[in-house]
Image (cartoon, helix red, strand yellow):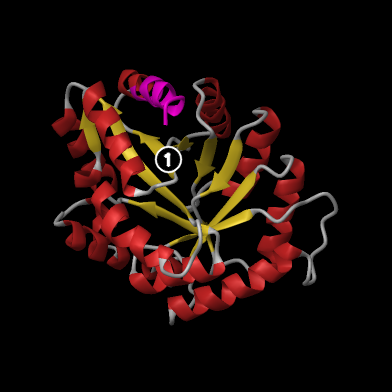
């Protein structure tokens, strides 16, 4: 299993580059960037790829509805060429509250939309469509998928899935069986909030205050209900080094091919967590 970094602190561009550089220096294999309503993750990935040699750069995830698949393919292939083909493209339909509430687009039939989108995107990335980018190899494509229908689409049309808020048990008994049923050797990337800390309850409370609203988004609500949890902060793994190491090993045993470490806590706690992740990266 590979260990990468999910870059959570997006306060400024240089910080994101420095976080990726620190991940590489600690022996982590990848740095993934998110898209909400701020930085463009593909642009950031291109800049990080130029500044940090060798590390895989990825998106988790680019929202599909606001971007035509031809436009996304052109941008992704450009980033692939600019980074020596180190890009992994994570995409997803996002949530109704964002697509309709912010972009003003219809979120009708997201599974049908995703299947059609992936079909078109893969054709464009392969060079059999309209987009031609010399020197670019088609990046691997991951689909954000939590439910059975989306996991089937991920297995059939993508190279795997990237998940968030999933426990190791969910990876083992829900994610892997459904995607393995339709895919051979899929990549299963789990973004996990981790904190080596002496104050685990406080860290969870801090995250609940900042991100607890995500618990009410339908796809996350269904996942949390499946896991017997009420808030996304309950998925945080916080404690001493042994606790965090055991949790990362549990994801490996569950069938995750990658864990993306999302650092939470204060600066000292984040540093301790990154150090531990680096130590474990060489042993898994």
Nearer to me, 260 or 209: 260
Q: Secondary structure at mark 1?
A: strand
80 relative to 210 in the view: left or right: right
Does residue 39 appear in this view? Answer: yes
Tell me where residue 199 sits by quadrant. Answer: top left
Number of other residues with Cα within 10 Å of mark 1, as a class: few under 14, some 14 to 19, many 20 or more: many
Point 66% across, 67% down: residue: 122
From what the image shows, is residue 197 above or below residue 49?
above
Residue 99 on image: x %, y %: 45, 69
Q: Which residue is mark 1?
A: 260
From what the image shows, is residue 83 above or below residue 179?
above
Residue 233 on image: x %, y %: 22, 45
Q: Main secondary structure of the magenta part?
A: helix
From what the image shows, is residue 186 above or below residue 55?
below
Residue 240 on image: x %, y %: 21, 23
Point 48% across, 81% down: residue: 112
């Amino acid at each position: 299993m590979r260990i990468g970094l999910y870059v959570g602190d997006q306060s400024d561009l240089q910080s994101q580059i420095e976080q990726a550089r620190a991940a590489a220096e600690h022996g982590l294999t990848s740095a993934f960037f998110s898209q909400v309503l701020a930085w463009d993750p593909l642009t950031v990935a291109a800049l990080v790829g130029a500044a940090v040699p060798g590390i895989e750069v990825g998106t988790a995830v680019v929202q599909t509805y606001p971007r035509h698949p031809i436009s996304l393919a052109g941008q992704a292939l450009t980033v692939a060429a600019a980074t020596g083909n180190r890009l992994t493209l994570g995409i997803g339909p996002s949530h109704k509250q964002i697509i309709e509430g912010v972009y003003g687009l219809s979120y009708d039939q997201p599974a049908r939309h995703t299947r059609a989108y992936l079909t078109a995107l893969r054709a464009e990335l392969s060079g059999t469509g309209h987009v031609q980018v010399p020197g670019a190899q088609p990046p691997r494509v991951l689909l954000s998928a939590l439910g059975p229908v989306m996991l089937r689409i991920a297995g059939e049309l993508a190279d795997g899935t990237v998940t968030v808020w999933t426990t190791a048990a969910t990876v083992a008994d829900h994610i892997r069986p459904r995607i393995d049923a339709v895919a051979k050797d899929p990549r299963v990337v789990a973004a996990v909030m981790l904190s080596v800390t002496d104050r685990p309850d406080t860290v969870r409370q801090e995250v609940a205050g900042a991100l607890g609203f995500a618990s009410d988004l339908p796809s996350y609500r269904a996942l949390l209900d499946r896991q017997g949890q009420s808030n996304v902060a309950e998925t945080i793994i916080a404690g001493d080094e042994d606790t965090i190491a055991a949790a990362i090993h549990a994801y490996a045993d569950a069938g995750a091919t990658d864990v993306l470490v999302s650092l939470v806590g204060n600066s000292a706690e984040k540093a301790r967590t990154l150090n531990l992740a680096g130590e474990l990266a060489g042993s898994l």
